[in-house]
Amino acid sequence: MPVNYYIFLSIALFCIGIVGVLTRRNAIIIFMCIELMFNAVNLLLVAFSKMHHKAAIDAGSVATNVGSDGQIFVFFIMVVAAAEVSVGLAIIVMMYRNVHSVDVNFLNRLKH
Amino acid sequence: MSITQILFWFLSVLALFSALMVVTSKNPVHSVLWLILTFFSISGHYILLNAQFLAVVNVIVYAGAIMVLFLFVIMLMNLNKSVEPQKNRWIKIAGGIAGGCLLLVLVAALRNSEIRQQVVQVKEGEIGLIRNLGRELFTTYVVPFEISSILFLSAMVGAVVIGKKD
């Protein structure tokens, strides 16, 4: 499978996530679109990892773990995303408790 | 067209369609369910790339834990009806155009790049197996692994402190 298919699929998923962040006002849906962008990047990292693995094998390398760094990075991105979601949802719950809405337009107090 | 290519296109179309439905559906609960479908199709891509460990972790962590957390919060706040007030239509159009421009620029920049001659190894290769990744994780990357445990501890404490009723 050529690598540019994976590149274009990831770009499309990432741009859908960006459009979601720009057009929605519900803070939870904005969060979900950020998760979508994380997943697009993860998919591309795994594809690149497999690409480098195949290139190393074709070049005659005997090391079996060439390219596994990309998958380790995906693992750490998942770790950070889980931590980020737990804190972010706590912040959203606190905000809902204060202003009884999750609309991000109520969060523009920093402007004034 | 081999079975691998058919699976690739099927999973890609499923991922893109459900991602679009995440953005466009009015009800937040439907958005969460479509996002779970997106995560499952991305896990299918991982299995196709023989990254079995990441496929399982993706299902457990994302579709299992994070999405249940989202669903919990949405149902706790009783947001499962479309209460989102209609935004200005021009802002929606502007957001769509901005995202489309980014898509256009990235595709145009990468369309004729050098890297497209490279081929991704599908349905074979050993590096995605749990044995190789575990060995790599506990030898080369053992310090980041331990630091991430501290990150989790601080995130847990932070979530409790923020969510506590004062």
Image (spheres, coloured by chain):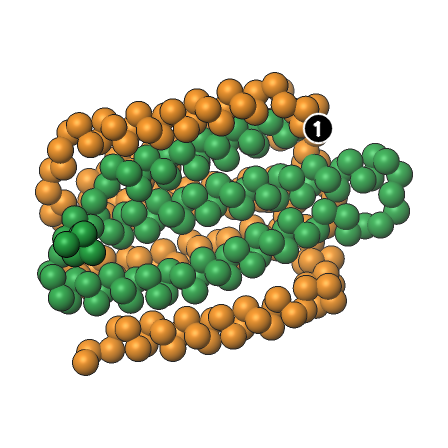
Chain colours: A green, B orange
Mark 1 is surrounded, within 10 Å at the Cα level, by few (under 14), some (14 to 19) or many (20 or more) other residues, namely some
Q: Chain of mark 1?
A: B
Residue at 67% over, 43% down: A49
Q: Position of residue B36 (x, y in %)?
A: 38, 48
Q: In the image, is A45 to the left or to the right of A85?
A: right
Q: Residue B48 sits in which quadrant?
A: top right
Residue at 36% over, 65% down: A86
Residue at 62% over, 66% down: B144
Reply above or below: A30 against B146: above
The foreground one among A1 and A20 is A20
Q: In the image, is B163 to the left or to the right of A52?
A: left
User: Which quadrant of the figure contains the N terminus of chain A?
Assistant: top right
User: Which quadrant of the figure contains the C terminus of chain A?
Assistant: bottom left
Q: Residue B137 sits in which quadrant?
A: bottom right
| Residue B2 shows in this picture | no
Residue at 35% over, 30% down: B99
The foreground one among B112 and A48 is B112
Q: In the image, is B78 to the left or to the right of A87?
A: left
- Residue at image mark 1: B118
| Residue B161 shows in this picture | yes
Q: In the image, is B112 to the left or to the right of A23?
A: right
Q: Position of residue B66 (x, y in %)?
A: 39, 59
Reply above or below: A19 against B137: above
